[in-house]
């Protein structure tokens, strides 16, 4: 007996995805999250695994886990007391940042206070020049003085981020040696270790976030390792990463920065996998929980990666699956402003007290309450029976807005939903325009507790081609972690022209990167399978201040083949910006290498089509598009491949509800996905 | 309002989606790096009358919320579906505000009628004229600022008007860039048109039409509510630019803010005559011109960030704009560098509102730092390098609840810097320091934000540095409510050596190999009595390297010994030096205070009155003559009551017979 387990921790629930290698069956379940004792929910789940499915811990052959400890450490500002060592005369790097304020229309808009407060920033007398040569070496006595001051000021971790350390990390390493000589107990984080990329603010802020979460994440992972071991789990746990991959927990302890945005990344990986199986190339993944809707663009089958993705208030520059978070979820609160205009969010009832209909003390109307009032929710169980639905409470809450709007309670509820959908419409329109994508060619892959509830309404407004609801939409992030490959990113800032000399330098960097990457995969991850290497270069026309990551061929770098490398960039520039300038000189700013090793994945087979229509559980009276309608209610478990029916329909399952408005038709495909399109 | 309040919110989100999608389309497809770096562009939707009802807030410049295309729209006689019009003439229709800004507008037809226009502009890197980039303070006529296209159809019923395009491109230095950017603008307008037609299909034409007006009414109603909370009154305030031309006299911007119930009047009488440099603001006498309304939008939005941003805001205000002044120049006055004067104007408006809401508004935003470019030769490759380096910004003013944001903020919050590492790799310079300028903050119970400063070294002979918008080396950013003015901006060549040169407000210089340049922005103004500042906050500034021990003691009366506040000594120090609260609401800084002892309000009133009698093209000349004459008077001979000014004026009229009729005629 051997099972593989993926675990994802959310605000309310912790999701488990379990795949049985022998039977090929995948099963899912949830436990309550235990935010005050991180890790306990995992152990509860491991116990549950045995209770529900009879799998003792020893059966677990592979275990992946996404942790939110790092991101919560930043959001709640309870990380290590940091000191920052910079090059002297550049101590204000985090305060000045890139200057721009979050809301430039607001005279009082402020950049967030840095994680390393300015009074614990110490300038070192040292200097590396732009070509990597050391003009002034680090002076150990100078460092020791700074260490003494930092310790006196209460620093627990020292982050070192020196000018041009991406070109030559020698001074940062010398500073670390000097720090440890002066204070062997100190935790030290180097910007050149975390992510050695040009642009001092970006490198420094990334390093401070890394230093800030280091101890908490390492401590969490260590206790998890121990607890799993104690429980009898033999497999070394794997930790999910923001880049959509996994790494060993052991490595996670030293590279926690890579884990910070893994929760949303895993969801996108799961979505991409579902989409790939059914041949949907262009997909918006749409993960809606209680407080936000996380949207990612999967274009041509590949998730988009971003730089400067936000962890709390801070951008980090390690490669991260790009996710746009819209501040609207099932718990978003509706209200009426002083001019009588209906608004939804950004305030959210979250998971506590939650929507009024959850009966946990919430009194203000939320999006979920609006759905409950309309009869669209409540036909099945919610959250695995953990929450019961109090429709009367929802009506009381929604009714508070009926008077100011002059509408019936049902019209008020529907208005809340329409306004909420229009807010998502706005944000997704922006996202599509940023990518230059046409919504009509995209599918919306809905998951999370509230995704399938709103997806069809949103897709209708956006003019999307279809909605896809996977079989287990509530646990797609856990599934994404389970199937993620072992993966890591490497970068070398090159800053060379695309010419013969430039490529010669680039080839040298490539040799270094390849050695680093293979060492990581073979030695540090102990992976012996096939190593997959993907080379990209951040390229631009001379004079541009921004780069485009372009897929390149390693052999072209080695052979000095200028033409194909240039052509690749011109093509990519054309794709991203709709134009290219084949005669303009090209620069290569960074060379990147992604190394990955494939892990075994669940194998699914397409089931043959069922015969006959599905039998509904019953009917319910609902209100949608301004009138009362009769909806057919289906249990998701009763739907089989080949089944097909039209809205108005409601499909219930353990952890979510799919709403199919009139004029749309559902088809169940061979893998059990719901495919929903406009009729005719 | 006509449509229901639920549909209004939904329509609002859809119109914003249109404007934001237009902005992303333009930003994504624009060719010039300048657009990507500075986001100096707009997109939006306007009513058939030209009022902006939808504007992006995520991307683009912050100055064009209240832009009105009405006069430009009317300059084209007939519109057909598929037409797109453009103009970059600051004197045709007064939608364009300097020649690099190419504005375009496309009529959106529904069932044969124009229901809206999709619009937008891009700041072109160059549109020809006397100097590269088309902008220089020294230019005196708009003719020198590049080719001007009066409103013309660049697309006619969907066909490109190649003649207009060719004339435009034949007159600019980098035509590929202009053409590439124009294509991006056209793509953005087409996106806007498509989105509007989708909205009409979804909501119906009647709701769309009424909704446009309702969205304008909604912003107006919000703006009026914010103003109603402010006490009625007349709030006069003036601010200055150090120079009205290279090496010139101070340039005064004067505003009497009048709050009456939920409406405003901005009376700019008393502002300087139009300049013979390019700092004029081409408003065409439009009493709600967006350049005049930007400061208002900042103030109202900052008082209540739920304010919906569109041209409904401007409806609450009316400007009085005497013709032939810097706020309402007469053709062909140059306008290219209106960026500096507009920025000062925004500060002026913020300052005029401050006494009406002293606990909700802030001291002067920092300014005076330049936008800088370096043009040098790479010693290794021999290649000529031209690179934009940092904009030197400063922070926001102190206010009742907090210190000002350091380094950048307030009305400069939209700018981005260039990383030190990139400057060194690309611009052929070595940066010796980049950070906050010590002691630059305007002192206060809550101090103003610090300015930024940069020190760098050049390595090649004949390294040219341009530093646009230099100012505030003399007249600094005012403090309010007993807070003090911020520090001056600085521009020093080889500081601390025997070759040190104070470059003042110079905006072009040549560096040699080894030369070191120090440049900094001024600091923002403070709020409240500096002696009431929490000593711990003063100590923190010292620990952070942002204030010296001397500054702490002299300005704040805080005594710091061995890294700790000596509370007893601080109390004694503060008690011993306590003095009566400063007169007036503003602290204007020593230089301006001294200047206004000579150039009193009475003198300025006399000057305004007298110059208004002269033909426009004489005013600037007469101003300079009068300033020179007053300057030459012995201090004890000056009366400051306006009579000196009248005497000098009379002498000038006497000297030039052709002025007598004009002077006598009034």
Image: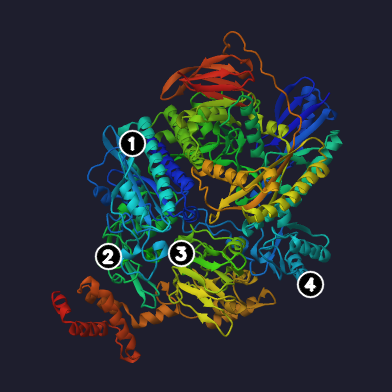
Subunit bearing disc 3 = B
Which residue is tagged 2?
Answer: B332
Of the image marks 1 and 3, the number of the one nearer the N terminus: 1
SS for callout 2: loop
- Can you tell which quarter of the image residue B258 is in? bottom left
Of the image marks 1 and 2, the number of the one nearer the N terminus: 1
**Could you classify mark 4 by the number of other residues whose Cα lies within 10 Å: few (under 14), some (14-19), or many (20 or more)?**
few
Q: Is residue A23 above or below residue B464?
A: above
| Same chain shared by disc 1 and disc 4 | no
Asked if residue B454 lies left or right of residue B273, the reply is right
Q: Contact (CB < 8 A) between labels 1 and 3?
A: no
**Cα distance, mark 3 to mark 4?**
45 Å
Q: Contact (CB < 8 A) between labels 1 and 2?
A: no
Which residue is tagged 4?
Answer: A141
**Cα distance, mark 1 to mark 3?**
39 Å
**Could you classify mark 1 by the number of other residues whose Cα lies within 10 Å: few (under 14), some (14-19), or many (20 or more)?**
many
Q: Contact (CB < 8 A) between labels 3 and 2?
A: no
Image quarter of the N terminus of chain B: top left
Task: Tell me what residue is drawn at x 53 percent, y 42 percent.
Answer: A576
**Could you classify mark 3 by the number of other residues whose Cα lies within 10 Å: few (under 14), some (14-19), or many (20 or more)?**
many
Q: Contact (CB < 8 A) between labels 3 and 4?
A: no
Which residue is tagged 1?
Answer: B208
- Can you tell which quarter of the image residue A199 is in? bottom right
Judged by depth in the image, the label closer to the viewer, 4 or 2, is: 2
Judged by depth in the image, the label closer to the viewer, 1 or 3, is: 1
**Cα distance, mark 4 to mark 2?**
65 Å
SS for callout 1: helix
Residue B281, how many percent across, how many down?
A: 33, 63
Which residue is tagged 3?
Answer: B362
SS for callout 4: helix
Q: Nearer the viewer, residue B466 or A140?
A: B466
| Same chain shared by disc 1 and disc 2 | yes
């Amino acid at each position: 007996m051997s099972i593989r387990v993926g675990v994802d921790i959310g605000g309310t629930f912790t999701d488990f995805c379990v795949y049985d290698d022998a039977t090929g069956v995948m099963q899912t379940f949830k436990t309550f999250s235990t935010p005050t004792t991180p890790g306990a929910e995992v152990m509860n789940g491991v116990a549950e695994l045995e209770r529900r499915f009879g799998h003792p811990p020893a059966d677990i052959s592979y275990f992946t886990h996404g942790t939110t400890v790092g991101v919560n450490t930043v959001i709640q500002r309870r990380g290590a007391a940091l000191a920052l060592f910079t090059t002297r005369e550049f101590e204000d790097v985090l305060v000045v940042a890139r200057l721009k304020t979050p809301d430039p229309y607001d005279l009082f808009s402020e950049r967030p206070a840095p994680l390393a407060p300015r009074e614990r920033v110490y300038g070192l007398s040292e200097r590396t020049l732009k070509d990597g040569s050391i003009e002034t070496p680090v002076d150990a006595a100078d460092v020791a003085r700074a260490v003494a001051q930092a310790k006196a000021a209460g620093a627990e971790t020292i982050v070192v981020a020196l000018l041009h350390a991406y070109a030559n990390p020698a001074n940062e390493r010398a500073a670390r040696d000097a720090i440890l000589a002066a204070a062997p107990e100190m935790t030290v984080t180097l910007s050149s270790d975390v992510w050695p990329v040009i642009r001092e603010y970006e490198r420094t802020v990334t390093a401070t976030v890394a230093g800030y979460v280091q101890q908490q994440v390492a401590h969490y992972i260590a206790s998890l390792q121990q607890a799993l071991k104690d429980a009898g789990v033999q497999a070394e746990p794997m930790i999910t990463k923001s880049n959509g991959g996994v790494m060993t927990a052991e490595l996670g302890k030293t590279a926690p920065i890579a884990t910070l945005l893994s929760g949303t990344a895993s969801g996108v990986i799961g979505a991409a996998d579902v989409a790939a199986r059914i041949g949907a190339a262009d997909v918006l993944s749409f993960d809606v929980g209680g407080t936000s809707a996380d949207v990612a663009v999967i274009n041509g089958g590949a998730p988009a990666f971003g730089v400067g993705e936000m962890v709390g208030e801070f951008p980090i520059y390690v490669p991260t699956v790009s996710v746009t978070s819209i501040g609207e979820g099932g718990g978003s609160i509706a209200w009426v402003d002083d001019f009588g205009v209906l608004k939804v969010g950004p305030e959210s009832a979250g998971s506590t007290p939650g929507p009024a209909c959850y009966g946990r003390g919430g009194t203000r109307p939320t999006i979920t309450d609006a759905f409950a009032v309309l009869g669209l929710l409540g036909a099945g169980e919610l959250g695995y029976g953990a929450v019961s639905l109090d429709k009367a409470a929802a009506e009381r809450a929604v009714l508070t807005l009926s008077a100011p709007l002059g509408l019936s309670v049902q019209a008020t509820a529907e208005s809340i939903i329409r306004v909420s959908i229009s807010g998502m419409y706005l944000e997704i329109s922006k996202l599509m325009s940023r990518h230059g994508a046409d919504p009509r060619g995209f599918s919306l892959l809905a998951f999370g507790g509230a995704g399938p509830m709103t997806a069809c309404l949103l897709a209708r407004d956006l003019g999307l081609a279809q909605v896809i609801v996977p079989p287990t939409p509530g646990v797609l992030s856990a599934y994404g972690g389970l199937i993620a490959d072992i993966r890591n990113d490497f970068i070398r800032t090159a800053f060379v022209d695309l010419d013969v000399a430039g490529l010669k330098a680039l080839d040298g960097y490539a040799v270094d990167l390849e050695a680093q990457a293979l060492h990581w995969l073979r030695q540090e991850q102990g992976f012996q399978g096939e190593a997959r290497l993907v080379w990209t270069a951040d390229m631009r026309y001379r004079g541009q201040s921004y780069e485009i990551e372009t897929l390149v061929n390693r052999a072209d770098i080695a052979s000095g083949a200028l033409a194909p490398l240039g052509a690749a960039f011109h093509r990519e520039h054309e794709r991203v910006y709709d134009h290219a300038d084949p005669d303009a000189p090209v620069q290569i700013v960074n060379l990147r290498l992604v190394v990955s090793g494939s892990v075994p994945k669940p194998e699914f087979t397409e089931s043959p089509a069922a015969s006959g229509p599905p039998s509904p559980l019953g009917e319910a009276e609902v209100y949608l598009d301004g009138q009362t309608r009769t909806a057919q209610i289906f249990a998701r478990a009763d739907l089989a491949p080949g089944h097909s029916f039209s809205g108005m329909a409601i499909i219930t399952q353990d952890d979510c509800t799919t709403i199919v408005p009139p004029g749309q038709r559902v088809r169940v495909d061979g893998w059990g996905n719901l495919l929903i399109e406009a009729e005719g | 309002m006509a449509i229901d309040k639920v549909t209004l919110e939904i329509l609002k989100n859809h119109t914003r989606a249109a404007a934001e999608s237009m902005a992303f389309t333009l930003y994504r497809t624009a060719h010039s790096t300048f657009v990507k770096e500075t986001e100096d562009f707009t997109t939006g939707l306007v009513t058939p009358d030209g009022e902006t009802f939808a504007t992006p807030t995520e991307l683009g410049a912050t100055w064009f919320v209240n832009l009105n295309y009405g006069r430009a729209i009317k300059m084209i006689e007939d519109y057909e579906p598929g037409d797109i019009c453009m103009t970059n003439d600051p004197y045709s229709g007064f939608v364009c505000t300097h020649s690099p800004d190419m504005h375009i507008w496309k009529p959106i037809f529904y069932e044969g009628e124009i229901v809206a226009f999709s619009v937008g502009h891009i700041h072109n890197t160059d549109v020809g004229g006397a100097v590269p980039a088309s902008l220089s303070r020294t230019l005196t006529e708009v003719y020198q600022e590049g080719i001007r296209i009066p409103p013309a159809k660049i697309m006619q019923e969907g066909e490109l008007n190649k003649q207009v395009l060719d004339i435009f491109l034949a007159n600019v230095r980098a035509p590929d860039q202009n053409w590439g950017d124009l294509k991006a603008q056209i793509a953005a307008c087409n996106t806007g048109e498509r989105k509007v037609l989708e909205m009409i299909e979804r909501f119906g034409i009647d709701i769309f039409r009424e909704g446009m007006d309702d969205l304008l009414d909604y912003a107006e109603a919000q703006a009026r509510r914010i103003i109603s909370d402010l006490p009625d009154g007349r709030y006069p305030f003036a601010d200055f630019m150090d120079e009205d031309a290279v090496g010139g006299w101070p340039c005064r911007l004067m505003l009497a803010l009048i709050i009456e119930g939920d409406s405003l009047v901005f009376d700019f009488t008393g502002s300087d005559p139009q300049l013979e440099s390019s700092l004029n603001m081409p408003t065409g006498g439009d009493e709600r011109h967006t350049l005049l309304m930007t400061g208002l939008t900042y103030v109202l939005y900052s008082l209540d960030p739920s304010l919906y941003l569109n041209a409904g805001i401007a409806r609450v205000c009316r400007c009085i704009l005497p013709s032939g002044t810097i706020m309402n120049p007469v053709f062909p006055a140059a306008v290219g560098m209106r960026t500096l004067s507009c920025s000062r104007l925004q500060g002026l408006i913020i300052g005029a509102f401050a006494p009406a809401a002293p606990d909700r508004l802030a001291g002067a935003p920092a300014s005076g730092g330049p936008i800088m470019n370096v043009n040098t030769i790479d010693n290794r490759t021999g290649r000529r390098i031209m690179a934009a380096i940092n904009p030197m910004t400063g922070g926001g003013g102190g206010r009742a609840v907090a210190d000002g944001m350091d380094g950048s903020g307030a009305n400069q919050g939209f700018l981005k810097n260039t990383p030190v590492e990139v400057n060194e790799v690309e611009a052929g310079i070595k940066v010796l320091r980049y950070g906050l300028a010590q002691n630059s903050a305007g002192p206060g119970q809550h101090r103003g934000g610090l300015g930024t400063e940069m020190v760098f070294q050049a390595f090649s002979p004949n390294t040219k540095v341009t530093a646009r918008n230099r100012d505030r080396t003399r007249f600094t950013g005012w403090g309010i409510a007993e807070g003090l003015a911020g520090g001056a901006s600085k521009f020093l060549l080889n500081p601390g050596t025997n070759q040190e040169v104070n470059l003042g407000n110079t905006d072009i210089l040549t560096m040699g190999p080894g030369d070191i340049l120090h440049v900094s922005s001024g600091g923002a103004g403070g709020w409240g009595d500096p002696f009431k500042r929490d000593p711990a906050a003063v100590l923190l500034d010292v620990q952070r390297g942002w204030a010296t021990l001397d500054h702490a003691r002299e300005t704040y009366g805080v005594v710091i010994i061995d890294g700790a506040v000596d509370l007893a000594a601080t109390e004694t120090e503060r008690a011993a030096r306590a003095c009566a609260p400063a007169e007036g609401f503003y602290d204007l800084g020593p230089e301006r205070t001294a200047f206004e002892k000579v150039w009193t309000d009475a003198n300025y009133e006399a000057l305004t009155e007298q110059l208004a009698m002269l033909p426009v093209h004489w005013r600037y000349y007469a101003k300079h003559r009068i300033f020179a004459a007053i300057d030459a008077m012995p201090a004890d001979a000056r009366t400051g009551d306006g009579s000196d000014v009248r005497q000098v004026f009379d002498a000038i009229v006497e000297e030039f017979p052709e002025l007598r009729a004009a002077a006598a005629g009034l």
